[in-house]
Amino acid sequence: MNIGIFSPKLQSIELNQLDLILALIEKGHNPIVYVVNDDSQSELFNKIKVKVVNIDFLETDICRLRSFKTINRLADIFEADSIDLLISSSATPCIYGALAGKRAGVKAIYSQFTDIGRLFQTNKKFRKFYIKLLCKLTAKRSDKVIFHNMDNMMFFVSKKLIKSDKAINLGGHGINTEEYTKSEYTHSRTFLLAAPLAVDKGIWEYIQAAGIIKQLNKNCTFKLLVKNDDSPYAIERADLLPYVEKGYIDIFDNYDDDIENMMEEAFCYVIPSYHESMPFELLLAMAKGRPVIATDVPGCRDAVLDGINGYVVPPQNVEVMVQRMLQLLADEETATQMAQESYTICSQKYDAYDVVDRLINVIFGSAEMKSND
């Protein structure tokens, strides 16, 4: 069976869906990867002979979808590759994939809305109406719509964008704990945030918290590992330089190469986002055995249990974030206990193999799995 894996970026597929792809290959299927405006290369996919197709004619802003010409072009590609089953992730691939897949005669379509935070961040009535319409069309054309936390799923159901019998909460992408192994926890007094340079990732709140704690003469470090963001919420790198000069933060750029090592060096991982789904960075921090301070938003509140493996704080509330940071700095024993709890929760709840098994059961059902084993 030819199975399309449709996601915005190649890197996100390698991070979040590699175990699914390997499981599909093992069961005799032929995965084909589709990405949006991404001409990067993957040595890994070349090695395992997985075809990668760059769909370079899609508008990432789905509200610019005004013509079915784009849908027809994408449908022609799916038809040429004889796609039998399509698994899409993130809003743009889900919407384009469902519309084009149905037109191409794809037998089964599964749409994963992995993050809906930015999707509905608008005050424009027509834009909001149009996005809801596209989401309804996507759900109607999908066999199942998969979410990675309960909040996002219930939002779609409560807004009547999807019928409840089509909605599945998978609980996160999961992380390969054999590849990303637990590391020794040291009280380095180093906080870390790894995120795109965007306002809604809580960059400014993190910097404000760093400035307050630094002014208290606390001997600690605030690291910011960044990658570029092309959304309307993007922050210019130059805007951060005054805070580097003041000694509030240290900025690092080699996101892909450095994130694992920097996580191992961290005393605490911080997620001050305004919205999330189930970010890889959060799961990586937990797999490495690090306490997490995260905002009380969908996804984060599922994985970070307040007072157990970290602290949950209100979004955009610098004061509470600072209080929790100071608590961890002052109580190394609690920090150590939280680090261990992070690893335990991750290995029990977010192991990639378990998550892949759940997804495969959703897609194929136990009967087909038995026939392919």
Image (cartoon, helix red, strand yellow):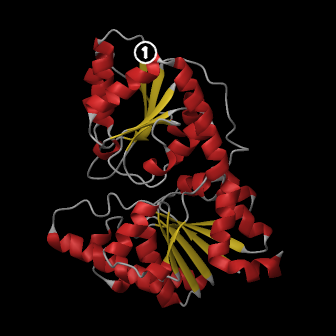
- The C terminus sits in image quarter: bottom right
Q: Is residue 6 left or right of residue 2?
A: left
- The N terminus sits in image quarter: bottom right
Q: Position of residue 100 (x, y in %)?
A: 46, 83
Residue 214 appears in view: yes
- Numbered-mark total: 1
Q: Is residue 272 left or right of residue 16?
A: left
Query: Relative to 340, is 140 above or below?
Result: below
* Corner quadrant of residue 227: top left
Residue 237 appears in view: no
**Considering depth in this image, is 120 or 149 the residue closer to the camera?**
149
**Considering depth in this image, is 274 or 293 the residue closer to the camera?**
293
Query: Relative to 310, is 14 above or below?
Result: below
* Corner quadrant of residue 185: top right
Q: Amino acid at mark 1?
A: Cys
Name which residue lies at 29% across and 20% down. Answer: 211
Q: Is residue 370 left or right of residue 265?
A: right
Q: Position of residue 287 (x, y in %)?
A: 62, 40
Task: Residue under label 1, please give it.
Answer: 220
Residue at the outermost right position: 373
Residues packed near mark 1 inside 10 Å, few (<14), some (14 to 19) or many (20 plus): some
Q: Position of residue 358 (x, y in %)?
A: 65, 67
Q: Position of residue 134 (x, y in %)?
A: 33, 78
Name which residue lies at 75% across and 82% down. Answer: 368
**Considering depth in this image, is 340 or 54 the residue closer to the camera?**
340
Q: Is residue 305 left or right of residue 208?
A: right
Name which residue lies at 35% across and 68% down. Answer: 155
Name which residue lies at 71% across and 43% down. Answer: 179
Circle 1 — which element?
loop
**Considering depth in this image, is 67 or 351 the residue closer to the camera?**
351
